[in-house]
Amino acid sequence: MSRHTSRSGPTGGPLEGSTDASREGPRAASRRPFRWKRLVLVLGSSVTAVAMAVGALFAWLWTDAKVSTVGKEPFGNALAIPPQAESSVDKDGTRVFDLRMRAGETEFRAGVKTPTWGFNGSYLGPTLRARRGEKVRVRISNALDEASTVHWHGMHLPARMDGGPHQMIAPGGTWSPHWTVDQPAATLWYHPHPHGGTARHVQRGLAGLFLLDDERSGRLPLPKRYGVDDLPVIVQDVRFDGARLAGDRGMLQNVGFLGDRTMVNGTLRPFRQVHDELIRLRLLNASTARTYAFGFPDGRSFSLIATDGGLLERPASMERVQLSPGERAEIVVRMRAGERVMLRSFPQGNYGDGWQRRFGGGDDSFDVLELRAAARLRPSPALPATLGKPETPDGKGSVRGRHFDLKRSGINGRSMDMGRVDETVTRGTTEVWTVRNSNGMPHNFHVHDVQFRVLEVNGSAPPPALSGPKDTVFVPHGTTVRLALRFTGPADPDTPYMYHCHLLYHEDEGMMGQFVVTEKGEPGAPREHPGHGAGHTHR
């Protein structure tokens, strides 16, 4: 006989406080842990799926971020050579150039018309040329539908003629800067400089070379026939979005826009037939964010003869030359009859960590320009052993030092303010500027009006590629450079020059400051200067 005990209230229902589980007995209780196990399994599976998806996305981003055009396509387009700008000479001896900023269309690819901007044409601009001691005037008209500027990158000239963000030219407006060329022979360039919009204006095509000559360089036995054995090489990286030029940054590209192919002088996959033993390449990195390491795949050495501001003291033999945005280098390469050799940009190891190299372009490689030597070559004279003594200061007699800490948020913790003067320097004095980058990503440093000498890189003497006159210097993460600058005027306490990162996305975001040049004993401009504001617009 079995005994069964039930708990019930006075009415025969369940006792107050009893639960369904207590009524259902052990079977109900055993189901609860099963439900928790199932929930844990579902959550674990979901987390695993998300982690796998994130991992797959990262693997795709990591793989997709590396770009190489090496050996991908034949180079069958004849290299365009920018024409040398026509000029006239006024009665007072001033050489006068005319530039017109305009919109147009350019057929980079057969049958595809791409909207572009240019000077005196649909893309890029003519090469301006003047001699040391000449007075020059450039009459600029703006036929665009928005304001812009024209900055003379590397030129020593009055601040009011510099073409920075304070010298805007309104749509339909004109501007005629004028100055006397007072610096050695060099490969300079011109491009827009509107605050917050420089990258976009340069990407659209507003850029050109400004070559300076002088008596000393004219006497040297260097290749100097423009477009023959002396070639302009304006390098830009681009990406096409249908017919249009893309300008957007890729995911994780904190240096700015990085394209998936290069152009030279506006020519995709260019080649140049050459007929001389020695060929001079005037390299300009006109890209907005990409840094290149130029060389040749067969490992041949070439001679570096000039940097941003002019000739080195003597030719330097090397196999690679690294140029960040805005930098220039003149190299001379020896050709052999009948050969074809590719100018290439190689991966670079000084971009910081592997993350920055991969997403900042340091791992990328590009075929840039194919040189095709004729079956018979004209003999070229040997390069001279000495080229001349640079005129940049050596740092002796410096009256003061300044420090500049580079970060994307600004320089020395300050973002660009058009109404603030950051530094005041005295005309005729030499200073030493220390520039440091501990920001985890590449930067560079450009100073308007002056050519400086690199005294040290991380406490050591600079390599040969940085031994010549410079106005822009690459400062990768973990690097400190010391620069000697001499400010020879003219003084203008009311109009500032710029110093900034020339990775143009960084510049546009605010990595820029302002300095004025004053006479000795003259009070400097106040740090908040109401006269600077948004700058003057020429109409």
Image: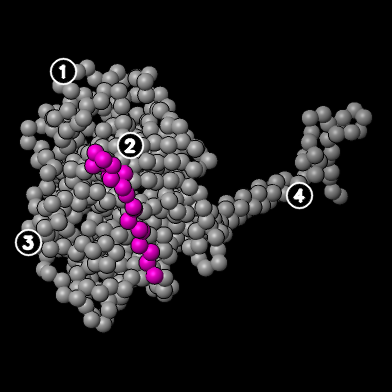
Q: Which residue is mark 2?
A: 177
Residue at 18% x, 23% y is 519
- Residue range of the region highlighted in magenta in the rendering: 78-96
Residue 392 image point, x, y percent:
13, 42
Quick one: 233 or 409, which is closer to the camera? 233
Mark 2 residue type = Pro
Q: Which residue is mark 3?
A: 385
Question: Can residue 412 be seen at all in this image of the molecule?
Answer: no
Q: Nearer the viewer, mark 3 or mark 2?
A: 2
Using the numbered discs, state the Cα–Cα distance from disc 2 to disc 4 in whole angstroms.
Answer: 93 Å
Q: Is residue 327 magenta?
A: no
Going from N to C along the chain, the mark reached first, 3 or 1, is 3
Left or right, 487 with reference to 388:
right
Going from N to C along the chain, the mark reached first, 4 or 1, is 4
Rendered view: 91 above or below 265: above
Using the numbered discs, state the Cα–Cα distance from disc 3 to disc 4 in whole angstroms.
Answer: 98 Å
Say the numbered circle drawn on residue 199: none
Mark 1 residue type = Gly
Q: Which residue is mark 1?
A: 521
Using the numbered discs, state the Cα–Cα distance from disc 1 to disc 2 in whole angstroms.
Answer: 29 Å
Magenta stretch, main secondary structure, is loop
Using the numbered discs, state the Cα–Cα distance from disc 4 to disc 1 in whole angstroms.
Answer: 96 Å
Going from N to C along the chain, the mark reached first, 3 or 2, is 2
Going from N to C along the chain, the mark reached first, 2 or 4, is 4
